[in-house]
Amino acid sequence: KAGVTQTPRYLIKTRGQQVTLSCSPISGHRSVSWYQQTPGQGLQFLFEYFSETQRNKGNFPGRFSGRQFSNSRSEMNVSTLELGDSALYLCASSAGGTGGNTIYFGEGSWLTVV
Amino acid sequence: QQQVKQSPQSLIVQKGGISIINCAYENTAFDYFPWYQQFPGKGPALLIAIRPDVSEKKEGRFTISFNKSAKQFSLHILDSQPGDSATYFCAASRAGQGAQKLVFGQGTRLTINP
């Protein structure tokens, strides 16, 4: 069974630009979550989508947004990039139940903002 | 507000020794406590997880000990091997709609000396 796949793996953007990251969850998984990982703040939850609806949201500004498609694939977008947005962005998928399903992470997309 | 506190930040253990990483949580609504292992350049991978109705869970060389009254849980790695050198994260989540929202500790960088 293929794991969580994220593209692109590495990208460099200029301050003020926007970026879109993609995630393909494990087959059959309906929940996709996004996390930001930085050395200073650690792993922080961005948002979760389930059946194309945002079900949970973390404490990030509105510049961070996402969506989920009918095939459960997800994208996240960051607009008006700031230097502090440089991070590893991780996508995670699970079956999406309400009882602590196993959550599987992809290898992440490394974003550098210059 | 950091809801899951992890210690130590770094740990050096000799090969064959026991590695112990501790976590404490504040939110009594948490009911699922996973541990993740992350190697450089990779996404976090689930090691082992526990629920509050169990005080201990073992999987191979990895054991979680859980103390509900103290709101603490710990990871023990027996017979630590150089291949165990990685960063370890504890996490917690709530049941219900927030089950996919993991709150992570700050991580422990474990080094096993050969």
Image (cartoon, coloured by chain):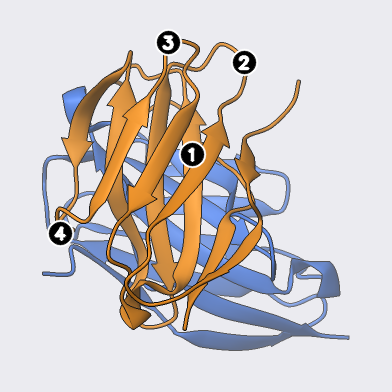
Chain colours: A orange, B blue
Q: Quadrant of residue A96?
A: top left
Q: Position of residue A75 (x, y in %)?
A: 43, 36
Chain ID, mark 4: A
Point out residue A45 in the picture as x, y percentages from the top left corner.
30, 52
Q: Is residue B85 above or below residue A5?
A: below
Report whether residue A103 is seen.
Answer: no
For the point 19% across and 50% down, the residue is A58
The residue beneath circle 1 is A92
Near mark 1 (Cα within 10 A), the count class, few <14, some 14-19 or many ≥20, is: many
Q: Chain of mark 1?
A: A
Position of B82 with respect to A51 (left or right) is right
In the drawing, what numbered circle is on residue A70? 3
Q: Nearer the viewer, mark 1 or mark 4?
A: 4
Q: Identify the residue at horizontal 33%, vertical 69% (top origin).
A: A81
Inter-mark Cα distance, 4 to 2: 30 Å
Could you tell me residue B36's position as x and y percent?
54, 54
Disc 2 marks which amino acid?
Ser
| Front label number (2 vs 3) | 3
Q: Which residue was labeled with disc 2?
A: A27
Q: Secondary structure at mark 2?
A: loop
